[in-house]
Amino acid sequence: MGRAKADSNKPSEEKLPEWAEQEIKSVQFGDEQVVKRSGYILDTYENDFKIDIQLYEPLPDNRTIVEGLDVPKPLILDDHKKGFVYEFKIKMFKGDLSARLVEFLKTKFSLDMDAIYRFELEDLQLMEIESDVSSSTPIPAEGAGNDMDDV
């Protein structure tokens, strides 16, 4: 038996209704919460004054990666390098969603989300990290622990 024509079409992505889009676009953010976390820069977007970062300790919403973090104009992105450890001072803003939208997202999209977050970088400082590799990794004496001679 041949396939029905409807089966061969890929289902189009379901879009949010207009009321949900409007609520998300107009969410009111509460007071800022300032947190300090260590991590490193993943990517920089100099023209947009944004960076992506990876944090070692999660933020209060449990995320460890922040994409599109707003950088204040006085900070020069060229001065900061990817892969180096920094202490980030981050302003977090939380905007709560209505119970109606929370329930809609949960039932239609299986998305458990009750708030939207916005992040701004307040400051970052390069951390001095010393390498303990040479002192913490003992080098065995010649012949010590070498069982290959006994075989």
Image (cartoon, rainbow, N blue to C red):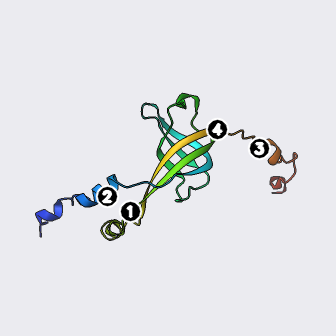
Q: Which residue is mark 4?
A: 125
Residue furthest toward the front?
A: 31
Q: Is residue 47 above or below residue 54?
A: above
Q: CA distance from mark 1 to mark 3?
A: 48 Å
Q: Classify residue 134 by image quadrant.
A: top right
- Where does label 1 land, which residue? 97
Task: Tell me the CA gap for discs 4 and 1.
Answer: 34 Å
Residue identifier under label 3: 133
Q: Is residue 122 above or below residue 98?
A: above
Gap between marks 3 and 4, in whole Å?
A: 24 Å
In this view of the protein, which residue sits in the foreground, 25 or 1?
A: 25
Q: Nearer the viewer, residue 126 or 129?
A: 126
Q: In the picture shown, does residue 80 fall above or below 143? A: above
Tell me which amino acid carries mark 4.
Answer: Gln
Mark 2, other Cα within 10 Å: few <14 / some 14–19 / many ≥20: few
| Sequence-first disc among 4 and 1 | 1
Q: Residue at x 53, y 42 (%)?
A: 121
Amino acid found under the numbered disc labelled 3: Val
Query: Which quadrant holds the N terminus?
Result: bottom left
Q: Is 135 rendered above or below residue 23?
A: above
Type of the residue with mark 1 = Leu
Instruction: Tell me which numbered mark, 3 or 4, is placed earlier along the sequence.
Output: 4
Which of the 4 quarters of the picture holds residue 41?
top right
Graded by Cα atoms within 10 Å as few (under 14), some (14 to 19) or many (20 or more), the crowding at tag 3 reads few
Residue 84: image quadrant is top right
